[in-house]
Image (spheres, rainbow, N blue to C red):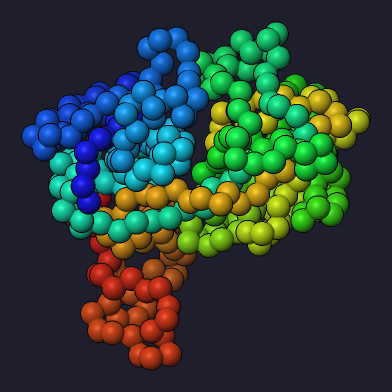
């Protein structure tokens, strides 16, 4: 792959991230690649994704140095520009990042020499009954303990605006879209629609729609299922609902999920990948659906999602079932599978971390 413009998203609060950024800049200088820091808060405000990637010269590769939160910031920019994103792992419980900080130079060499795979991930798109905004009186409270809020989403210029179908917003989510309560003693009451038909009305702390990628984030903490990131589904999960039916609902990628705030509800915040983007009042609604485009992430080896799940979640085995030594894989990792298994996705490398992990 020819890399001519690289965008760098750095978790400035971590010394190892700052040091790794120096390695990336040195590599760029050696290979005559333009390197630009983007998505920074030093000017006291935040810009739209289009403004940020435009200021960075429309990079074709975005490198994130941090945990999954930093990766989400980079993914927001990469999705806007259809750029590749490479995540360098400096987090603790992350699923999104690809390589360790000690292997940054080797990873960049692998990208440049086309020793990479492209991992495509589903994104969520959003329509709403009106433009999303955070009321001026609430902004300081909502952003307490965070950096500056992202600006309100713009209207997508390439989509039709219709009173019945709502306003298409220029925003995408890699993890989830969440409708959540704003005050402790007032739950969100909302009607939940699947494919345009009412499923049920909920009163809950929050209602979230996640991608398979986001199934191991907020949705997982709320009791939702773990979903392979290779799947094509939407996962609706209520958070602390006041009703007997508290299960997640998994829909097909062409079955959108709508959330309408009911009249008896208080106001509700709309968060996209953990960032508050607006507040809805009773009667307002949002529709969440699979975006037509996908995020393109750099993968340098086979994706052992379930091995990472076991490691990150510290899964242990019942003492009576533990055998001596490391468990062997179920099927061979050195010989080709028989014909009836040839269509399956099986790891073909021995257990153990990639040299870049």
Query: How many labels, in total?
Result: 0
Q: Judge from the rendering whether residue 357 lies leftward or rightward of residue 344; answer left or right.
A: left
Whether residue 164 is visible, yes or no, is yes
* Residue lying furthest left: 30
Residue at 57 percent of width and 14 percent of height: 144
Q: Quadrant of residue 126?
A: top right
Q: Nearer the viewer, residue 83 or 347?
A: 83
Q: Judge from the rendering whether residue 102 lies leftward or rightward of residue 246; answer left or right.
A: left
Q: Nearer the viewer, residue 308 or 176?
A: 176
In the image, residue 145 sits, relative to residue 109, either above or below, namely: above
Q: Picture coordinates of residue 139 (x, y %)?
A: 64, 13
Q: Picture coordinates of residue 21 (x, y %)?
A: 22, 29
Q: Quadrant of residue 57?
A: top left
Q: Picture coordinates of residue 157 (x, y %)?
A: 60, 35
Residue at 22 percent of width and 38 percent of height: 4
Q: Judge from the rendering whether residue 3 lies leftward or rightward of residue 57; answer left or right.
A: left
Whether residue 103 is visible, yes or no, is no
Residue at 58 percent of width and 49 percent of height: 291
* Residue lying furthest bottom: 339
Q: Judge from the rendering whether residue 208 lies leftward or rightward of residue 45; answer left or right.
A: right
In the image, residue 74 sits, relative to residue 289, either above or below, namely: above
Q: Picture coordinates of residue 47 (x, y %)?
A: 48, 20
In the image, residue 325 sits, relative to residue 308, either above or below, namely: below
Residue at 71 percent of width and 14 percent of height: 135
């Amino acid at each position: 792959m020819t890399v001519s413009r690289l965008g760098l998203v750095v978790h400035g609060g971590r010394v190892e991230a700052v040091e790794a950024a120096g390695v990336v800049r040195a590599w760029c200088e050696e290979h005559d690649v333009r390197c630009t820091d983007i998505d920074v808060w030093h000017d006291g405000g935040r810009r739209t994704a289009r403004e940020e990637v435009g200021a960075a010269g429309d990079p074709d590769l975005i490198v994130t140095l941090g945990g999954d939160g930093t990766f989400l910031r980079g993914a927001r920019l990469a999705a806007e520009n259809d750029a590749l994103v490479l995540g360098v792992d400096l987090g603790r419980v992350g699923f999104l990042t690809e390589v360790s900080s000690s292997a940054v130079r080797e990873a960049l060499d692998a990208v440049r020499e086309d020793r990479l795979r492209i991992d495509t991930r589903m994104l969520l798109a959003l329509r709403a009954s009106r433009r999303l905004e955070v009321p001026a009186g609430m902004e300081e409270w909502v952003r307490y303990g965070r950096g500056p809020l992202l600006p309100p989403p713009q209207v997508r210029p390439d989509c039709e605006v219709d009173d019945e179908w709502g306003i298409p917003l220029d925003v995408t989510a890699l993890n989830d879209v969440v409708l959540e309560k704003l005050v402790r003693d007032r739950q969100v009451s909302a009607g939940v629609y699947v494919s345009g038909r009412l499923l049920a009305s909920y009163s809950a702390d929050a209602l979230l729609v996640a991608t398979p990628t986001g199934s191991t984030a907020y949705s997982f903490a709320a009791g939702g299922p773990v979903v392979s990131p290779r799947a094509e589904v939407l996962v609706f999960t209520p958070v602390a609902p006041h009703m007997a039916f508290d299960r997640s609902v998994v829909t097909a990628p062409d079955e959108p999920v709508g959330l309408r705030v009911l009249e008896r509800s208080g106001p509700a915040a709309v968060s996209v990948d953990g960032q508050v983007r607006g507040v809805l009042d009773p009667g307002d609604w949002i529709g969440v659906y699979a975006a037509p485009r996908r995020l393109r992430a750099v993968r340098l080896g086979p994706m052992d999602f379930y091995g990472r799940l076991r490691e990150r979640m510290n899964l242990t085995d019942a003492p009576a079932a533990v055998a001596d030594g490391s468990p062997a894989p179920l099927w061979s990792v050195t010989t080709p599978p028989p014909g009836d298994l040839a269509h399956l996705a099986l790891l073909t490398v021995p257990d153990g971390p990639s040299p870049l992990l």
